[in-house]
């Protein structure tokens, strides 16, 4: 597996009399130039030319990709490649002068040969619902990592140290899309390295920013509406969190559409728990920069509210609580009823974790202030939910928490609470009366049907013999 360019046996090997890198960079000479690379003086090879050939030999050797799974591969050759990768990395780190362009192309080709490879099929759960909560358990470590780690370090150094205009021909749209594909790797270490490289590319290659944002958005939308399985959504959202943090205020329409069409739909996937922390940060950044978006975000979360996934409900309750803290007071009245209605449904949940988390929301001062802004509309819904919990919920801890919240609500407005309680009892009494009346009507209909059947003469069917 992997791209093979040169076999280790055929790769050029440096001569025994090696010139050290330290000796090369201690020389007070110009960086590699064409004349020094091609013509030795007085019949002897110059130190610069020798060192250049040695580096090219190491780069050429590193083009061969080991799988670490083929029994025919030699461990000594694998170790030799690792040493040569370290040699190349040391050369890039210690260089005080710009790398010559004739070295950049072989370096980038070697990086592409090692990184851009077909990824193995998922090795963990076969369905998204079976994904573990811990991201560490989802990781499958690639055996090639001893080589990949150094290659990623080489690429990061090149991105940081070389002028983006010089690397533009090597790091193009195709290269960026290949990097983006590697975020599907199950190796957490590789995704972390990818995140650092991709973020640095976005930071330095300013002329690619629009393309990179669009490419990441395509990955998000494909995850939401197609596969619902992608290991690197969390890392990509971390990159986006840094990007959003740099957005100027007022926000552009393009950025608001990204929030509505990309970030909010990410709440609907079954694997939300794997990247919810990063998603919450991105969304909160938008609301902090433009608080008027709080209503859009709240209604978007309610739109994708799960019905049976209790773990997602707990996560989204926490996100709504954090969202309320960033809302402006003039939005309280419009959002109080829908948010309190949803929280009340959750505290009536038969799942004790969901019910307890919903009840703890009432300890948040901002949430209580929001409820107070529309107390006439909110209290009838909340009071009914509290009384239902006290009568019907199976969990003692949920009942105890409900008692505490009920006491707090009664202190807020005792008159209104009692009035809502009386109205609820009146509605329940009316419902009982309606049920009795409905049953009585059905009994009358059934009795009339029986009497009609009893009074109706029997019908005889005559069969003629002719």
Image (spheres, rainbow, N blue to C red):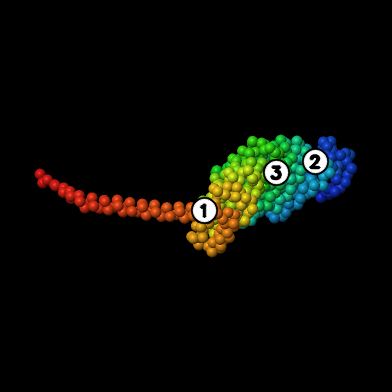
Q: Give the CA distance from mark 2 to mark 1.
A: 80 Å
Badge 2 crowding class, 10 Å Cα cut-off, few under 14, some 14 to 19, many 20 or more, is some
Q: Are marks 3 and 2 in contact (CB under 8 Å)?
A: no
Q: Which residue is mark 2?
A: 99
Badge 3 crowding class, 10 Å Cα cut-off, few under 14, some 14 to 19, many 20 or more, is some
The answer to whether one can see residue 131 in this image is no
**Where in the figure is residue 267, as x and y percent of width and height?**
58, 47
**Where in the figure is residue 37, as x and y percent of width and height?**
82, 38
* SS at badge 2: loop
Which of the numbered marks, if any, corresponds to residue 2?
none
Q: Quadrant of residue 38?
A: top right
Q: Which residue is mark 3?
A: 245
Query: For the image shown, how many numbered marks are present on the structure?
Result: 3
> Which residue is at the front of the view, 197 or 362?
362
Q: Which residue is mark 1?
A: 419
Q: Residue furthest bottom?
A: 396
Residue at coordinates 45% horizontally, 53% vertically from top-left?
426
Of the image marks 1 and 3, the number of the one nearer the N terminus:
3
Please state which of the two labelled residues, at mark 1 or mark 3, is closer to the viewer.
1
């Amino acid at each position: 597996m992997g791209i093979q360019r040169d076999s280790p046996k055929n790769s050029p090997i440096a001569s025994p009399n090696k010139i050290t890198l330290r000796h090369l960079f201690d020389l007070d000479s110009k960086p590699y130039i064409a004349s020094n690379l091609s013509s030795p003086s007085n019949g002897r090879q110059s130190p610069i030319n020798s060192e250049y050939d040695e580096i090219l030999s190491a780069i050429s050797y590193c083009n061969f990709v080991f799988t670490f799974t083929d029994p025919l591969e030699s461990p000594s050759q694998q170790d030799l490649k690792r040493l040569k990768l370290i040699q190349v990395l040391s050369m890039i780190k210690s260089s005080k002068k710009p790398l010559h362009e004739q070295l950049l192309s072989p370096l980038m080709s070697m990086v592409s040969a090692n990184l851009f490879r077909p990824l193995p099929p998922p090795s963990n759960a076969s369905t998204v619902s079976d994904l573990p909560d811990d991201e560490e358990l989802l990781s499958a470590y690639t055996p090639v990592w001893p080589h990949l780690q150094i290659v990623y370090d080489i690429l990061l150094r090149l991105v940081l140290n070389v002028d983006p205009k010089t690397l533009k021909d090597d790091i193009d749209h195709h290269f960026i899309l290949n990097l983006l594909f590697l975020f599907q790797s199950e190796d957490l270490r590789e995704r972390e390295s990818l995140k650092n490289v991709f973020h640095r590319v976005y930071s330095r290659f300013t002329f690619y920013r629009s393309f990179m944002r669009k490419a990441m958005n395509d990955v998000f939308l494909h995850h939401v509406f197609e596969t619902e399985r992608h290991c690197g959504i969390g890392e990509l959202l971390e990159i986006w969190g840094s990007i959003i943090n740099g957005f100027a205020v007022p926000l552009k329409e393009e950025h608001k559409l990204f929030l509505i069409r990309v970030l909010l739909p990410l709440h609907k996937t079954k694997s939300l728990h794997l990247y919810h922390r990063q998603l919450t940060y991105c969304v909160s950044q938008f609301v902090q920069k433009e608080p008027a978006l709080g209503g859009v975000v709240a209604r978007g979360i309610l739109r994708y509210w799960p019905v049976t996934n209790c773990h997602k409900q707990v996560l989204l309750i926490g996100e709504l609580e954090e969202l309320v803290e960033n809302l402006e007071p003039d939005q309280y009245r419009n959002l109080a009823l829908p948010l309190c209605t949803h929280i009340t449904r959750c505290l009536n949940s038969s799942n004790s974790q969901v019910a307890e988390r919903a009840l703890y929301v009432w300890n948040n001062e901002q949430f209580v202030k929001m409820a107070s802004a529309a107390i006439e509309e909110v209290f009838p819904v909340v009071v009914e939910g509290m009384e239902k919990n006290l009568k019907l919920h199976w969990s003692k801890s949920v009942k105890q928490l409900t008692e505490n919240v009920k006491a707090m609500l009664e202190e807020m407005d005792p008159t209104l609470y009692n009035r809502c309680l009386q109205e609820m009892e009146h509605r329940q009494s009316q419902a009982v009366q309606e049920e009795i009346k409905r049953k009585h009507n059905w009994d009358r209909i059934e009795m009339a049907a029986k009497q009609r059947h009893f009074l109706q003469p029997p019908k005889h069917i005559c069969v003629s013999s002719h």
